[in-house]
Image: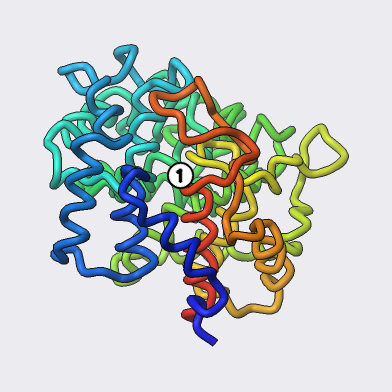
Amino acid sequence: MSWKETIAEETIAWLLEVDTTGIRFLALRDLLDHPADDGDSLAAEEDAYRRGPISEILAAMEPEGYWSQAGAGYYPKYHGSAWSLLTLAQLGARIQRDERIARACSYLMDHSLTSGGQFTISGAPSTTVDCLQGNMCWALLELGCTDPRLDKAFEWMARSVTGEGVAPSTERKAPVRYYSGKCGPGFACGANNQLPCAWGAIKVMLAFSSLPAETRSALVEDAIRQGLDFLLSCDPAQAGYPTGWSTKPSGNWWKFGFPVFYVTDLLQNLEVLIAFGYGQDPQLANALQLVREKRDTKGRWSLEYSYQDKTWVDFGAKKQPNPWVTLRALRVLKAASEL
C-alpha cells in the first residue's frame, strides 16, 4: 500500500492552501515530488520568499549578515544568527535564491566557527556542544553553503564522536581536546551529567545523513556506525537514553513542534534513522505507530512544543492542528514507506 493511501486527501489539500504561505512549495516538493522547475512549485517558492516566514526572517537581518547581536550568533535565544539560520534551513531557504543567506552563512562561520572546526556559543572552542555543532553543520549544508570550512567542521564532529585524535578535557595543553560541555566521545555532554546525550546525537547524525554517501570519509563512516548503535540501543518510542540527573526521559520527546532547535522529539529521531535506511526495521515500528496515532480525525498533527513569541515568526497556536508539524510527520511516514 502506498503511503498516500493512508493519508486523507483533505490533509494534503490543507497543506496546499494558498494562505499557508511558505509551506505550499515544501509540500509540493517533499510530499508530491513536483520537479523544482514545475510551474506550481516555482510560484509557491517565489511566494515563500516574497511574503512568507523566509521573507520575514531575512528582513530582520542586519546588513553585515547577523541577527539581533553581532558575534557568534547563539544569543539572544531564539533571535540570534544560529537560530535564524537554523529556522531558514527548516523552511527550505537556499543560498541560490537570496544572496543575504550566503552573507549570513559566511558571517556565522567567521564568528562562531573555530580553526579547529568547532561551532561555538562564544567563539572559543571550549563552548562547543554536540547539539549546536550538528545543527549548524546540517543547516549550512541544507542552505546550500559550500564553504570549505564546513569540511573541517564535519571532521571535528566525527572525531568528537569516535574520540580519534581528541585528548581528554583534563589535558589542557593538548592541541585538540574535549571540554566541559562537549566532554567526551560517544555524545558525552556536560549538560547531561557527562553521559551521552541523545538530543545532541540526533543533531550530529542528522548532519551526517545530509552528506552524500560518496563524500563520507572513513572517519565519518565510523562516527555514523557509533551513532546508529547509540540511537538503536533502545526502542525509539520509549526514548530510554541516558537522562543525566533525571530518572526518566524528558516529556518533550513526545511533543512534536516546529521549528526544532536543541530540544528534539521522536519525529526527528525517526527522520535520522530512516535517512540511514531503517524505515522498515521492526525496531522503529512502535515509534511509527505512535506518530500515526497522534493525528486527529482530519489527518493533521498538532503543535505541542512551541516557541511562540520567542522567534521572528510564530508558526501557529499550541495544541492546535499545525501545517508545519503535519508536514514533518508526513515526511517521516513517506520516507519510511519508500524504503
Say whether residue 254 is left or right of residue 175. right
Which residue extends farthest bottom? Answer: 1
Which residue extends farthest top? Answer: 69
Say whether residue 57 is left or right of residue 76. left
Give the secondary structure at mark 1.
helix
Say whether residue 207 is left or right of residue 18. right
Task: Give me the residue at 48% from left, 32% from top.
Answer: 174
Categorize mark 1 by other alpha carbons within 10 Å: few (<14), some (14-19), many (20+). Answer: many
Q: Toward the viewer: 289 or 270? A: 289
Residue receiving disc 1:
134
Q: Toward the viewer: 213 or 86? A: 86
Q: What's the colour scheme?
A: rainbow
Task: Give me the residue at 17% from left, 36% from top.
Answer: 102
Q: Toward the viewer: 171 or 35? A: 35
The location of residue 251, given as percent across then percent down, is 76, 41
Q: Quadrant of residue 248?
A: top right
The amino acid marked with disc number 1 is: Gly
The location of residue 91, given as percent across then percent down, is 35, 44
The location of residue 281, given as percent across then percent down, is 64, 78
Report the label total: 1
The location of residue 189, given as percent across then percent down, is 64, 36
Q: Quadrant of residue 47?
A: top left
